[in-house]
Image (tube, rainbow, N blue to C red):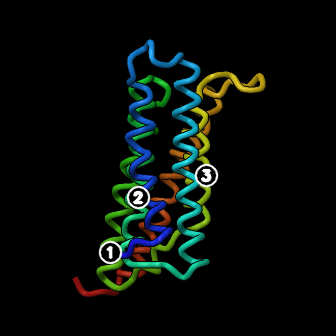
Amino acid sequence: MAFNLPNTLTWLRIVLIPLFVVVFYLPGDWLPPHLVNIVATGLFALASATDWLDGWLARKLNQTSAFGAFLDPVADKLMVAAALLVLVDLSRAGIVASLIIIGREIAISALREWMAHEGKSKSVAVSFVGKLKTSAQMLSILLLLYHDPLLGLNCGVIGQWLLDIAAFLTLWSMFHYLRMAWHAMKDQPA
């Protein structure tokens, strides 16, 4: 296991997960509700920024590793699943959209693992619709964590709309990846 700056940032993202979750479950007199939203949103935003930064640094510093390639998507899935579970618990996110997103993440992670085992990982490489899904998903989670009005905008409502859009894009990207995997594997013997 290589300890380098990109992998350290990925580990930081994993450490931030329980921190932004626990903020919502602190005793009520520790932080006012608005400050709870700000702190949790800030921690999630920091974790999200490390996701972009660790990949960029790994490429820039030529510090890519098999361990980092494994750990990075695991950290992403844990971060999104934890946030969605908290948001469902707080009645800020719809359970159906959240289950679609979490279920797809598990299914596509398994598909990617299987395709890598078969030597065909390039056939399920990240697509444009996958990147669009991730953008809508992360922005929706940030807005739903913040939840309070911002510049006259209802962050809760906008966040829920974006989460529904992310759920639709999630299904679209899942079918895209399944189709790509099918084309890569259809001529393989059973």
Residue 97: percent from the left, percent from the top? Answer: 46, 38
Between 189 and 169, the one lying in front of the other is 169
Give the number of the disc on residue 135. Answer: 3
Residue, x 58% and y 44% (percent of image)? 45
Between 3 and 183, the one lying in front of the other is 3
Q: CA distance from mark 3 to mark 2?
A: 22 Å
- The image quadrant that residue 35 belongs to is top right
Q: Quadrant of the N terminus?
A: bottom left
Give the number of the disc on residue 11. Answer: 2
Give the number of the disc on residue 1. Answer: 1
Residue, x 48% and y 60% (percent of image)? 9
Residue, x 68% and y 24% (percent of image)? 154
Residue 133 visible in the shown view: no
Dot placed on the residue nearer the N-terminal end, 3 or 2: 2
Q: Residue furthest left?
A: 190
Between 4 and 119, the one lying in front of the other is 4
Marks 1, 3: nearer the viewer: 1
Q: Mark 1: which amino acid?
A: Met
Between 171 and 20, the one lying in front of the other is 20
Q: Secondary structure at mark 2?
A: helix
Give the number of the disc on residue 146. Answer: none
